[in-house]
């Protein structure tokens, strides 16, 4: 059994909470920093990962769509960036847990798009090129956030 702790594009209340975490970090006041919990920090990091994914894809889309003669507007999109915790169980009772990894899974990238010349083949080629790039970015963002440059792995 694997437990999941998710960070995704969240309702307003969660966004406000992450804003408070950011404000506390930026204040650099010792009393503010002591008020941060591990949960606050983990949530802020995972939220930053999801938002970085969408920001990177939007930037890449703007570059490619100008070259491909496409007009594109991204619509409501969502996904998760989560940690995996593997419990150690004895007779069905959890006695310990260890972090086994992280995963980004973007469930929906919806967009409205059209070719400026109404060229269906050009539009199809553009859409088919998006999937592999977006999938690669699901690996790139977590690696950029958590990779230790001091190791050769």
Image (cartoon, helix red, strand yellow):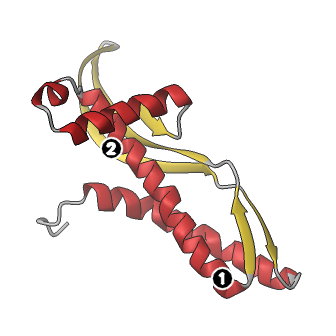
In front: mark 1 or mark 2? Answer: 1
Q: Which residue is mark 2?
A: 45
The answer to whether residue 128 is above or below residue 143 is below
Find numbered disc 2 in the image and state the secondary structure of the residue it sits on. Answer: helix
The answer to whether residue 11 is above or below residue 139 is above
Residue closest to the eye, 74 or 24 = 24
Q: Position of residue 28 (x, y in %)?
A: 16, 38
* Residue 96 position by quadrant: top left
Q: Residue at x 65, y 55 (%)?
A: 109
Q: Label 1 vs label 2: CA separation?
A: 32 Å
Q: Residues within 10 Å of mark 1 (few under 14, many from 20)?
A: few
Q: Is residue 96 left or right of residue 93?
A: left
Q: Position of residue 150 (x, y in %)?
A: 11, 65
Mark 1 vs 2, N-terminal side: 2
The answer to whether residue 132 is above or below residue 82 is below
The answer to whether residue 26 is above or below residue 57 is above
User: Residue 2, can we see it?
Assistant: no
Q: Residue at x 56, y 30 (%)?
A: 11
Q: Which quarter of the rendered picture does the C terminus lie within?
A: bottom left
Q: Residue at x 53, y 34 (%)?
A: 10
Q: Is residue 12 left or right of residue 22?
A: right
Q: Which residue is mark 1?
A: 66
* Residue 152 position by quadrant: bottom left
Q: Residue at x 64, y 76 (%)?
A: 129
Q: Position of residue 88 (x, y in %)?
A: 26, 25
Q: Which quarter of the rendered picture does the N terminus lie within?
A: top left
Residue closest to the eye, 38 or 23 = 23
């Amino acid at each position: 059994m694997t437990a999941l702790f998710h960070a995704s594009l969240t309702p307003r209340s969660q966004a406000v909470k992450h804003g408070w975490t950011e404000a506390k970090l930026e204040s650099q006041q010792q009393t503010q920093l002591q008020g941060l919990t591990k949960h606050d920090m983990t949530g802020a990091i995972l939220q930053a990962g999801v938002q970085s994914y969408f920001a990177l894809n939007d930037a890449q889309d703007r570059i490619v769509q100008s070259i491909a003669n496409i007009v594109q507007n991204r619509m409501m999109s969502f996904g998760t960036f989560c940690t995996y915790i593997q419990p150690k169980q004895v007779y069905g009772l959890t006695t310990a847990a260890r972090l086994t990894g992280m995963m980004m899974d973007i469930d929906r990238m919806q967009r409205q798009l059209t070719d400026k010349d109404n060229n269906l083949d050009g539009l199809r080629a553009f859409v088919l090129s998006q999937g592999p790039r977006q999938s690669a970015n699901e690996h790139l963002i977590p690696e950029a956030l958590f990779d230790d440059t001091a190791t050769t792995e």
